[in-house]
Amino acid sequence: MDAIKTYLDNVFAAFPRTEKAQALKLEMLANMEEKYRALKAEGKSEHEAVGNVIANFGSIDEIGAELGDDEQDCKQARKRACKQDAAGAESGISLSGGEARDYLAQSRKSGVLIGLGVWLILAGASAMFLIRGLTEAPNAAGILAALLAVAIAVPIFIMNWMRMERFEHYELQDVRLDAQTRAELELQRAAFMPRFAAKISAGVGMIIIAAGIFIFLKTQGYETLQFVLLLLTIGFAVFLFVTSCKAKSAFDILLNLGDYADRATDNKTEKIIGVVASIYWPLMAAAYLLWSFIGNAWAISWVIWPVAGIAFGAICGGVNAWLKPAGK
């Protein structure tokens, strides 16, 4: 029911903080909470109950009438509300409830597509190891399997980028939502966070278990199988990471939380990191291919990627610490 209280706080912010206003606010909160409990007793979900209660809420004029304010006072309250919206619009973008819900849905689909693409690439690499192990020598079939996986994954990445391109500006500016939509999203995010934690924990657990199996199989002499199982397991773990983090990021973007609370500095950071990434990752890919093909080191050259990922994370952290003022 915190969403209901937040909604009322936003509505009453347009009125002077008089004793009468506070008394009316408490009375309305009690009535809305009673209506909420009644809807829950009827079998409504928490989201449906909150949405129904907020949807039946009165207007600013009705609140002004309850407070005994005259027409001029109501006009002033509306002006204060409009000024708040205008001030937010200058430094951000305003979204309707439908636009916010569409962005959430598209972000979830985007997470699935990205996770699927990454899994396909790792699955192609594991297929190459499997074919190599069965034939005891590198051959065209294994390389073809890996290239086929990449050929399928790349169009998926491109399609996802094209679908999400229209939302890119959401990440660069503060997002303004009406009180009802914000309350609904805060409620949905609260319900999502336990699932987010469970997915992240499951992904980490899968990687730890896969590492243990990798070491065990190596001691037993199953060199091919150890790489196949490791890559497939990492692929599933990455899928969980990407889908859950993409959904969480969408909530944070819409509610201006976490990494999206201070976007002026973050935008500058992202531009610098983007330039570094455009040079860094192609160099890593070139190093991987040169080492693998020239040195015939497919069995070990994959270590470039986790090392490169850790190094890039350190670079990003350094850029972020350099740009952000102390104490923030």
Image: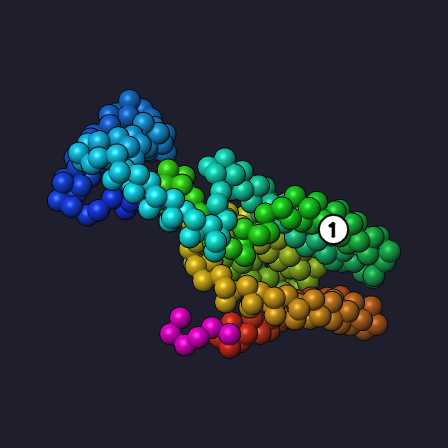
Q: Is residue 217 above or below residue 236?
A: below
Residue at image point 51% right, 55% down: 173
Q: Can residue 171 be spotted in the picture?
A: yes
Q: Left of 184 or right of it: where is 267? A: right
| Boundaries of the magenta span | 323-328
Quadrant, the C terminus:
bottom left
Amino acid type at image mark 1: Val
Q: Secondary structure at mark 1?
A: helix
Residue 129 sits in quarter: bottom right
Residue 89 covered by magenta stretch: no
- Crowd tier of the residue under label 1, counting other residues whose Cα lies within 10 Å: few below 14, some 14–19, many 20 or above: some
Q: Left of 295 or right of it: where is 112? A: left
Q: Nearer the viewer, residue 238 or 325?
A: 325
Residue at image point 65% right, 71% down: 276
Residue at the spot of label 1: 154
Judged from this view, the residue extending furthest toward the right is 140
Pinpoint residue 62: horizontal percent, then vertical percent: 26, 30
Pinpoint residue 78: horizontal percent, then vertical percent: 33, 40
Predominant secondary structure, magenta span: loop
Judged from this view, the residue extending furthest toward the front is 72
Residue 326 sits in quarter: bottom left
Residue at image point 47% right, 56% down: 91
Q: Left of 5 or right of it: where is 294? A: right
Pinpoint residue 293: horizontal percent, then vertical percent: 82, 68
Q: Can residue 236 be spotted in the picture?
A: no
Q: Left of 213 or right of it: where is 254? A: left
Pinpoint residue 16: horizontal percent, then vertical percent: 21, 46
Q: Is residue 170 above or below residue 299?
A: above
Quadrant, the N terminus:
top left
Residue at image point 54% right, 54% down: 171
Q: Nearer the viewer, residue 83 or 228?
A: 83
Q: Is residue 163 above or below residue 309?
A: above
